[in-house]
Amino acid sequence: MNPHFKQNIILISEIIVPKIHKNDALQYAFLKNFKHIFQGLEKDSSNKIKLLVIVIENLSFIYNFKSFNDLNFNERDKYINNLFEFPIGKIVGGLTGLRSLILISYYGIEDIWPTIQYDGPINNRVK
Amino acid sequence: MKNNLTFDVIIVGSGVGGATFTDYLLRKNPTLKIAILESGPHNTKENFNQREIDMTALYYNRGAVLSKNLQIGVAAGNTLGGSSAVYTGVSFRPPSSVIENWKNEFGLEFLSDEYVDKSLDEIEREISVHELPKSWDNDNNRLFQEGAENLGIPVKRLKINTKNCQQQGFCNLGCTTGAKQGTLEVQIPKITKLGVQIFCNTKVISVAENTINTIVLEAPEGTEPNTLENGSHQFTAKKIVLAAGVLNTPAILLRSAKLLGINNKNIGRYITLHPAFNINGIYHKNLSNYKGFPKTVYSDHFSKSDNFYLETSFYFPGVTAKNISGYGKLHQEIMKSYNRMMSILILTHDKAEYHNRITIDKKGNIVIDYTLSKDSKKALVKALQEATKVFFAAGCEQVLVPGSNKLPLTREDQKSIKNLISEKYLNLYKTPLSSAHPQGGVRMGIDKNKSVCDLSGKVYGTNSIYVCDASLFPTSVNVNPYETVMLLAKWVGENIMK
């Protein structure tokens, strides 16, 4: 995962799980999980995710007349909302798939578990 | 290419099809030299750490195998033991109506009542299939029964294949105690003691008559080391048995069609996926449904009239979050109620249709070309409506379902369920539709123009290639499929050397 891709993943993920917005520790833990899954994907799948992120970046110029990186949080939120209603189903389907990966990565963070009252693995409960 | 790995029989896949086949083959032919090639790594129960992120490694493509149209995700195990390492152990016999159809329409006459009953009695005894006691019902299972009973929906108890289960509740992340009687605990220890060699991380590229071309991949960190060097290997055998699952078995045959000299238009066709939604309601107090055995009851009340089953289920935070529609602040607020969530699994019966298939792309990668039919959509919507009623009847304050224009639904919405949950709101690109029971693609049947394998499991037009997994199913079995896979694997295993 190169730094540019990582940054874009964070920018998208902040809309899906806003708690990571401006929270360096959570972003670090989130990215660790995301990377763990992403690197285990078959090349074909990880390439499709990379392509989707490029599409999201480029469509921003058409939707927002500025680059994805330059959008503030509210603009990004509105833009991602629009993409979930995009007329091309495969863009929506791809985004929904990415959303799943983001949610699994976020709720895999051990520090998040107490906020949803999840005790985690049996070994955690014995401690 | 490293050659000269020669056996009498080689089986591709160590899941319920491959391991059961091997078990029955050895009972009649104990002196055969046998190998199993498994594409996944050799994980033992000590590797299962009950953490969602780590345990995605037990699934193909980390559990993220999507259909070509991106409308349904398919989960399949990719580890020693195959999907039996990650299933919950829900044990159904094939419905008699399905078996009758397979006999009448596809000529599977060997599935006589006597053979089916005797075989499954034996299989169930050996893998410890039994009903779990009512005292094991956690809140989710108890509330499902209460809700259904309040609505007059009959509920039945599920049968499960476990022994000395500690009710840890992490079945889908691998059983840490070995209680689940999948192939990892039952058949694999037995057959390896009898001399069967298992080669893990061994991906089958193609097969030809008596030949298998493979690549041995590096063993992932923390798993058992390979016994073969990494790289290309060729195996030879008198008979080759494909039990690589519905995603892989058709793909191997499609990649091998030229080598085998076969041109059967039915390879990969007629797959069914048993499309599923896992949905949640929010109860007024804490439930801790992730603790205890996740599934003890179900209802087949709507099976004949509306083509779906309702089963209990419960998942871990990541998968639960994925199953709840939406995102952002509202989604995070909803997830704060994780510990108050009740959960129901909807399983719809889909028909075997020619256009639904496993195919391969130019590089030979698997492509799931599947479109949900109008009938299946109708069944899903009806199931979402009925499950919503069960949640409210059980006492839930809110219900979270896809196919609704409102998230969450509240008790005030109960009178408008039909209007609020309807097909016009079911956008399949945005909903977490999933499948854990793919079936078909290499149909068994008496007519070689309508199927791929004959009644012995041999691929038409070949001399040495057989199949014994769920891809043999001519149609969907409509229930959790592993017992039916074992039934067919037993048949192929008993008869292959005749």
Image (cartoon, coloured by chain):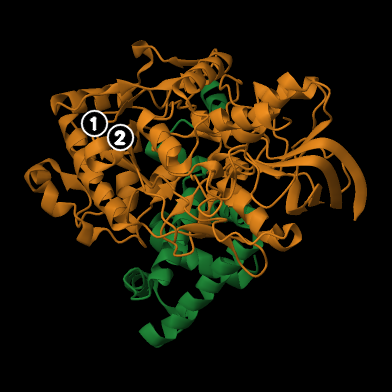
Q: Give how far across and how far down residue B220 sits, in percent.
A: 74, 44
Badge number at residue A71: none
Q: Give how far across and how far down residue B481 sits, in percent.
A: 47, 34
Instruction: Please count the marks in the image.
Output: 2
Q: The chain shown in orange is which?
A: B
Q: Give how far across and how far down residue A60 sits, in percent.
A: 42, 81
Drawn side of residue A72 relative to residue B201, left or right: left
The residues bearing labels 2 and 1 have C-alpha atoms spaced at a distance of 9 Å
Q: Quadrant of the C terminus of chain B?
A: top right
Q: Which kind of residue does numbered mark 1 sit on?
A: His
Is any part of residue B114 visible from this angle?
yes
Q: Residue at x 20, y 34 (%)?
A: B390
Q: Quadrant of the N terminus of chain B?
A: bottom right
* Callout 2 secondary element: strand
Q: Which kind of residue does numbered mark 2 sit on?
A: Leu
**What is the chain letter for disc 2?**
B
Colour of chain A as rendered = green
Callout 2: few (<14), some (14-19), or many (20+) C-alpha neighbours within 10 Å? Answer: many
The residue indicated by pointer 1 is B301
